[in-house]
Amino acid sequence: MNAIPRHDIAASLVVFLVALPLCVGVAVASGVPAELGLVTGIVGGLVTGLLPGSSLQVSGPAAGLTVLVYEAVKTYGLPALGAIVLAAGLLQVLLGALRCGSWFRGISTAVVEGMLAGIGLVIIAGQLYAMAGVAAPASGIGKIAGLPGLAGDLAASATLWPSFAIGAGTMALMPLWQRLPARARVAPGALVAVSSATAVTWLLGLDVKTVEVRGLIDSIQPPGTDVLATLGPGVIGTVLAFTLIASAESLFSAAAVDRMHDGPRTDYDRELIAQGAGNIVCGTLGALPMTAVIVRSATNVQAGARTKASRVLHGVWLLLFAALLPAVLALIPLAALAGVLVYAGVKLLPVEQFPVLWRAHRGEAVILAATAVAIVAISMFEGVLIGVLLSVVKAAWQTSHIKLEVVDEGSGPVHAHLSGNATFLRLPKILDDLEALPKNRPIELDLTGLHHLDHTCRTALTTWTEQHNAESTEQVRMSPSLT
């Protein structure tokens, strides 16, 4: 322990206190035993934390995967979760070995922010029901559409108020805690809020639901061969969604963390392999998937961490807590964890960034909004695919910029010069502009200024020019006065 710098030890304790309520809250919101969230946090520290890649970012269960995990558990069952996470981890390792890490950084930022916004909306809507202690509708649209009914139930039933008040108080305390002077904030806001809610619940003897404790060993469910036989082809989409979202969020987090410190930069391919290795272990243990988490990572840097020892030690503290103090979990109200998740969901919404993006890059703002709406209305995987498709279409449209310059001397041929990139996406506009030129004069079309000319455009423009010049020659022959 003497070889570990003291600032890394101090930082690891801070990260542990931040990670503890989030690990438990994400697990409960995902519909799995609370201990599995701790298992993922432990693996994120002890396995991924030891591997090369990023030196300071911290991995564990993330709110960004909550919706996807919940859908997977609901569709395939808890025993199948380990197999899905294991497959996603293997795919991450393969992608890292093929040096695809940098490609994930190329995913449109609007798609990633839209993905997080959609997840945030579903988390907020779903956890408001959990704060009241009632079951939430299954679909994202159903959760949002049912909120007025939830408000009516709260107004009509006094029995729901104790639970909802605990959750609302937890949610309100976290931002208030951040406004205190730094000297007063000796503990993380989430931990203080959950601890306060637990103390109030116990002291007042409130009849609210608390975390169910199974024990660390009993919660671990390695996937068996019988589970694999029950999974159909549809699980492939879920595995791809796990891989895409976990990898993109981890590598975007790494890029953000690199801007926060002056230490070694992230090797993105190695980091992808490290994340995959962690998910392989999590899958083998039947735990939640992991990803690098910007909140914990930023806390690690701000707490003064300088080496990877801090993130490894935070896993040690989580392991000691899970092994020695499991009964503490049974005291935590579910409504308090729901409040933590609602607050986390709000932080995922681009409230400040979206207006700026709308003014400066309207196309990106549309992609962000479309991705978020599709995730809420359809599902996570389809929503991300729609966002990626829209970003590809936007990029193709932008690279198809083309300019038509016309030189008309009043007699003789009209000289038309095209410059830029001529693709099929802009072909209708090009032909409309050419059709507006004089119909009784030949056109000399100059294509030498084009950077790119696809086959469809070349064929269409050549055919149009030949037909136009043939028709203009016929008009001149029949009406010589026109010349």
Image (cartoon, rainbow, N blue to C red):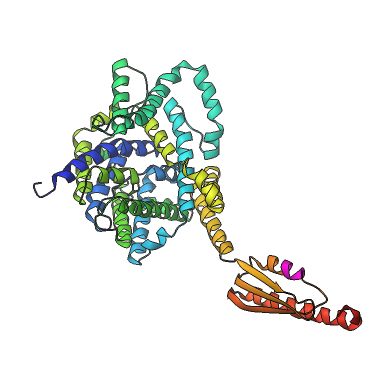
Residue ID at (29%, 29%): 192
Quick check: is 435 in the magenta stretch?
yes
In this view, 442 is above or below 181: below
Q: Which residues are magenta?
A: 432-436
**Residue situated in front as seen by the camera: 4 or 265:** 265
Instruction: Answer left or right for 266 relative to 65.
Output: left
| Residue pictured at 25% horizontal, 29% vertical | 184
Q: Nearer the viewer, residue 31 or 46?
A: 46
| The C terminus: image quadrant | bottom right
Q: Where residue 433 sits in the image (x, y, percent)?
A: 72, 67
Q: Position of residue 167 (x, y in %)?
A: 39, 26
Q: Position of residue 134 (x, y in %)?
A: 46, 27
Residue lying at the far bottom in this picture: please name it: 477
Residue 36, quarter of the rendered image: top left
Query: Which image quarter: residue 68?
Result: top left
Q: Is residue 194 above or below residue 401?
A: above
Q: Position of residue 137 (x, y in %)?
A: 51, 34
Residue 281 vs residue 475: left or right? Answer: left
Q: Is residue 335 visible?
A: no
Q: Does the magenta run of residues contain 15?
A: no
Q: Quick one: 258 or 277, which is closer to the camera? A: 258
Foreground residue, 57 or 201?
A: 57
Camera sees residue 112: yes
